[in-house]
Image (spheres, rainbow, N blue to C red):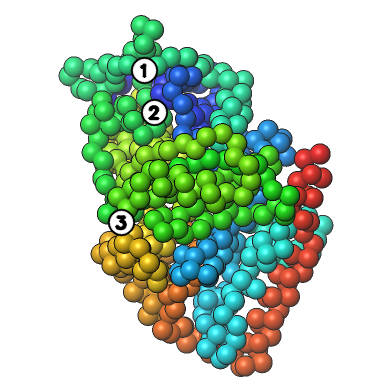
């Protein structure tokens, strides 16, 4: 539909998702190819709690040509090596989900099989000694890779913690410098073609009308275009992911070590995050409102934070799921308007980035072909479903039964896709991860083993090594990882030195 060059792009909404889109489009096409307008209202606040990321964020910043030191300075950023899960399997126990790989493959099979043999023969159950990020996190170390060190040492895989509002401001400057036009205003109506239903313009409260060819919906949970105007059905996953609320409140940083990881502590009716920035600590309690009131959840958060509060607690309501059509007609949803998966594995900003990547790959030239739209929707839906299953596994594989919330999680029926994956892992230590999936074998391994799901068997090729060869293989890996970690700086010291 259209049969004319698609060069007027309208982004409805700012925030992190809106300005990530604007920056990417302005970088790729330049101001001469597209007329890009972003509409946002200062009167409409942003949720702004997306403070933790995963390593894929570096692909985005590298694509934009952003200098890391400048970016971290402007966004109060710190490094993140993974997530420490506390009290998830049972109270008093914890495990670490690192970003980087665990061990190294050999003879065509994953390291997990050699580790399982090691464990079966009486070795330590601590797989963290074979992962650089885990060892570095234990020592509160994190610094960029030095190209002068030995080439055979494993690299450190990291992401960022940052202030989401500052990131939006940073990207706004970037995008506006490259020709993106920002319009201040509140969208009050969506005007559609009476025959086709395609969006033709957005009417602002001021009376101004913004026309376009392609509209990108970044209006957050209100989903003003894709949901309210076009009526794309919302697929509700709250029966698997029952947490539907969060209370958030930052506090002052403590004087202790600057931890290079996010903490996720399981609570009676959900979990609490701790995200260390340069200037403060981000805190939030994600909970299921059917089991605990907003007032009690707020009290729980306020009494458990480590430093002096910086502002009043703020409550956010949400529902896990996604739109059946994230691209419908000439509208594409990005961020919360297209779907929401609770922030347990810090995937919110990644899903924005993934949507941008898929948009750029399927960017229409002069029409909106249904085959292109279907291909886009299928890919983004598969992404949401794979991440959904990974999140559900955290809740399902718990031994906690101290509250009705955790008893529900233990007893809930699983989606078939996750049931099959857990069954396969239990039988053979294989997760059947496909190429395009975000979470790889080592991610599933860390979480499933951490949550207490131990495979019943391992691959027979792991037995081809003699006992001495097996021992030497594990020892060499541990030595290389330990050497890499020994070369890293303390996290706080390095940020002070690196950022001046």
Q: Which residue is mark 1?
A: 187
The reply, left or right, for residue 135 in relation to residue 390 is right
In the picture shown, does residue 222 fall above or below 189? below
Horizontally, residue 476 falls left or right of residue 240, namely right
Place of residue 404 in the rendered image (x, y in percent of width and height, measured from the top left): 31, 62
Q: Nearer the viewer, mark 3 or mark 1?
A: 3
Q: Which mark is in front, 2 or 3?
A: 3
Image quadrant in which you'd find residue 371: top left
The image's mark for residue 1 is none
**x, y (%) of residue 266?**
47, 59
Residue appearing at x 66%, y 54% in the figure: 260
Q: CA distance from mark 3 to mark 1?
A: 34 Å
User: Spatial distance from mark 1 to mark 2, Cα to Cα?
Assistant: 9 Å
Q: Which mark is residue 240?
A: 3
Q: Is residue 474 visible?
A: yes
Per the rendering, the mark at residue 219 is: 2
Contact check, label 2 and label 3, Cβ < 8 Å: no
Question: Regarding mark 2 in the picture, which secondary structure is present there?
Answer: loop
The alpha-carbon separation of the residues under discs 2 and 3 comes to 25 Å
Name the residue: 47% across, 14% down.
Answer: 184
**Helix or strand or loop: what does disc 1 sit on?**
strand
- Tag 1–tag 2 contact (CB < 8 Å): yes
Q: Earlier in the sequence, mark 2 or mark 3?
A: 2
């Amino acid at each position: 539909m259209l049969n004319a060059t698609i060069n007027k792009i309208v982004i409805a909404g700012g925030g992190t998702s809106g300005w990530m889109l604007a920056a990417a489009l302005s970088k790729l096409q330049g101001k001469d190819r597209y007329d890009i307008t972003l509409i946002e209202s200062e009167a409409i606040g942003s949720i702004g709690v997306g403070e933790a990321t995963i390593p894929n964020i570096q692909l985005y910043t590298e694509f934009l040509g952003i200098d890391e030191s400048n970016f971290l300075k402007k966004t109060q950023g710190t490094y993140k090596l993974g997530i420490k899960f506390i009290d998830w399997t049972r109270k008093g126990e914890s495990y670490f989900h690192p970003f980087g790989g665990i061990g190294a493959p050999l003879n065509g099979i994953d390291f997990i099989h050699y580790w399982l043999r090691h464990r079966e023969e009486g070795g330590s159950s601590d797989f963290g000694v074979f992962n650089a990020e885990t060892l570095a996190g234990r020592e509160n170390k994190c610094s960029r890779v030095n190209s002068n060190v030995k080439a055979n040492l494993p690299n450190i895989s990291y992401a960022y913690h940052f202030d989401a509002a500052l990131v939006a401001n940073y990207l706004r400057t970037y995008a506006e410098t490259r020709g993106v036009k920002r319009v201040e205003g509140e969208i009050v109506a969506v005007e559609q073609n009476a025959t086709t239903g395609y969006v033709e313009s957005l009417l602002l409260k001021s009376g101004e009308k913004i026309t376009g060819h392609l509209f990108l919906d970044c209006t957050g949970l209100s989903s003003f275009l894709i949901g309210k105007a076009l009526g794309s059905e919302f697929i509700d996953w709250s029966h698997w992911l029952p947490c539907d609320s969060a209370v958030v409140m930052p506090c002052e940083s403590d004087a202790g070590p600057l931890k290079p990881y996010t903490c996720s502590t399981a609570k009676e009716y959900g979990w609490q995050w701790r995200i260390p920035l340069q200037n403060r600590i981000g805190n939030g309690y994600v909970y299921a409102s059917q089991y605990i009131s907003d007032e009690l959840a707020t009290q729980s958060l306020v009494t458990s934070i480590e430093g002096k509060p910086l502002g009043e607690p703020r409550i956010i309501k949400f529902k896990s799921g996604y739109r059946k059509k994230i691209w419908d007609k000439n509208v594409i949803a990005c961020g919360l308007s297209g779907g929401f998966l609770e922030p347990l594995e810090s995937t919110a900003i990644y899903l924005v980035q993934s949507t941008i990547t898929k948009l750029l790959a399927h960017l229409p030239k002069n029409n909106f072909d249904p085959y292109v739209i279907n291909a886009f929707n299928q890919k983004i839906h598969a992404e949401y479903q794979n991440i959904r299953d990974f999140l559900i596994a955290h809740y399902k594989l718990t031994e906690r039964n101290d509250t009705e919330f955790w008893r529900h999680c233990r007893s809930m029926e699983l989606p078939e896709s996750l049931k099959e994956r857990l069954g396969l892992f239990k039988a053979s230590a294989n997760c059947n991860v496909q190429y395009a999936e975000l979470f790889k074998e080592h991610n599933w391994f860390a979480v499933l083993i951490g949550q207490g799901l131990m495979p019943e068997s391992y691959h027979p090729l792991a037995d081809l090594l003699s006992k001495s060869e097996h021992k030497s293989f594990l020892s060499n890996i541990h030595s290389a990882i330990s050497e890499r970690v020994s070369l890293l700086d303390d996290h706080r010291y390095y940020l002070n030195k690196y950022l001046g």
